[in-house]
Amino acid sequence: MSPDLKNRILHVDGDSFFASCEIALNDKLQGQPVWVGGGRRGDGIVIAANRVAKKFGVKTGMACFEAKQACPRGVLCRPHYDEYRRISAEMFQVLEQYSPMLVPISIDEGFLDFTTMDSVVWRHTTPEKYVQEICERISREVKIPVSAGLASSSRLAKLATDAAKPGFLEIKPGEEKEFLKDRSVRELSGIGKNRQRSLAALGALTFGHVAGLPSTLLKQKFGIWGQQLWLFANGMWHEPLLLEVKDRTTISSNTTLPYDEPDYEAALTFALSEAARLVGQLRREQMQARELSLTIRFSDFSEAGGSHRFREPQFLNSVMNARVEEIFRATMNGQFRPVRQIRIAFWNLERLDTQPTLWGRTDAERWGALDEAASKLDKDFSRPDKPALMTGAQLALRQLDDVHKNPKAKCPFSPQREIVKKLWGTDADPLAHKGDWEKRLAKVSKQIQFNH
C-alpha cells in the first residue's frame, strides 16, 4: 500500500436492530414505540427499543413492566431470533457488494474497507452519496434502518457512527484530533472501568486530555496500549482493516427454564439435551473441549455447580453427558429449591481434524462422517415442530411437557468465523472471490453514475 494512501474504514450499524426487525416483520408497527422483551416469557427485560420508544424513556435493561408504565401505548414484541438471523444475513449480503473487504463483528454491525475508493468509485461520486446509497438500499430491500461512520480506523469509524445516529458522519483525514478532543474516553470500545479510573487519575477524562499527556507517561503506565491510545487521541492512529478469523475458545448455553422446575430429573434431562446440542455444535465446527462446567441457578437466584477437566480433549456425547450428569447429581445432592436456569460451558477448545470418511481409521473420522450425514438428514427432513433427528434426552424432554415441543430459538450472536463462512461459503480466504466482487463493484459504480 502506498504511504500516501489514507485508510478509509466504514462502520455500518443496524439501528435498534431487534426492534427494527420486528417492525420489518410487521408494517403495522411503523411509527409506533416498539421494544423487544427478553426472559423466559418474552416479558422480562427490554433487550432492544426503537427510537420512538426511547423518547418516552424506554431503554435497554429496564423491566418490561416499567417500559409499559413509561410508554402505555408502546408495543412489546417477543423475540423472533430466527428471523433476526435471516435479516442479518440479507443485510450483510448487500454490504459485501460494496467493498472487497467486509469484516462482520456482530449480528447487526460490520466494517468495510474503502481505502481504494478514490481511484475506483469516488471519482464519479462522493463518500457521503456512496454511503447514502448503501443505507438507502438496505432500508429499501431489507427494511432495516442503518447508521454509518467513515474514518481512518475501525475504532474511530465506530465513534463516528455513534455520533451520527441516526445517519452518516465522515471524519475526513486531518480532522481526527478535532473530532475527538471533547469526547469522553469512555466512548472507546475496549476501555474498561479499571483503565478509565487509571486515566482519570492522570486527569484524562477526554481524548483531548489524553492527547496533552506525554506519550512516555502513557507507555510507562499502560505499555503498548498506552502508546496506541496517545496516537489515537492525536489523530495519528491509521490502522488497516484486517479480517482475522479465529477459532472460538469457548462455547456455552445459558437457558432460563420456561418455569421454575421442582423435578430435578426433568432438569437433568434438559441439561443433557443442551449438552448434546452443544457437542453437536462443537463437532460441526470441528472443535473439541478439554474442560466443561455446569452451573445451576435456583428459584431464589442462588447458584451452585462444578467443573471437570479431561486428560485429553473430548468430542463424544457419551463422554460429555456422563460428566454433565455426574456434576449435576453432585451439585443437587441435598438441594430442595426449584431450578430456574441451567448454564453449560465447554472451553479450552482445540481443533478436531477429521475427514468425513465413514470407514475412517479413528473415532474422530467416523464421528465426523456421521455428523455430516446427520446434519444433511436433519436439514432435508426436519420441520420446526418435528425435528428429523433427536437424542434420547431431547425426545424425553419433549415428552415431559408441551413447552419443550417447540424450544425457543437461541439468541443469534454468532462468532465472526461463522458469519464469514455463511457469507462466502469458506473461512479460508475472504478474498477468494475478489474477481466476482470487482465485477459487481463496476456494475454498482455505473448505477451510481446514472443516478447522480
Image: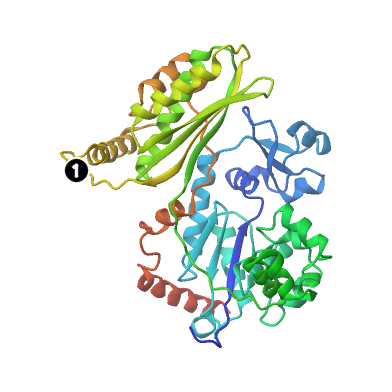
Q: Is residue 405 visible?
A: no
Q: Where residue 84 appears, x then y in whole percent?
A: 54, 45
Element carrying mark 1 = loop
Q: Mark 1 points at which residue?
A: 357
**Residue 322, quarter of the rendered image:** top left
Mark 1 residue type: Thr
Q: Nearer the viewer, residue 13 or 414?
A: 414
Return the residue nearer the eye: 360 or 47. 360
Q: Relative to residue 255, is residue 166 drawn left or right?
A: right
Q: Quadrant of residue 301?
A: top right
For residue 248, above or below residue 254: below
Foreground residue among 241 and 315 = 315
Task: Give the crowd class for mark 1: few <14, some 14-19, many >=20 residues within 10 Å.
Answer: some
Is 298 situated left or right of 416 in this image?
right
* Residue 369 left/right relative to 72: left
Classify the position of the C terminus by image quarter.
Answer: bottom right
Residue at image x 54%, y 13%? 333
- What's the coloring here? rainbow
Farthest residue, direction front = 220
Residue at figure coordinates x 35%, y 61% from the top left = 428
Q: Which picture quadrant has residue 391?
A: top left
Q: Where is residue 6 in the image (x, y as percent from the top left)?
A: 58, 82
Pick the residue in front: 88 or 274.
274
The residue sitting at 77% across, 62% down in the picture is 199
Q: Where is residue 111 in the image (x, y as percent from the top left)?
A: 55, 64
Q: Percent position (x, y) of residue 306?
A: 53, 27
Query: Furthest-left residue in view?
Result: 359
Residue 65 appears in view:
yes
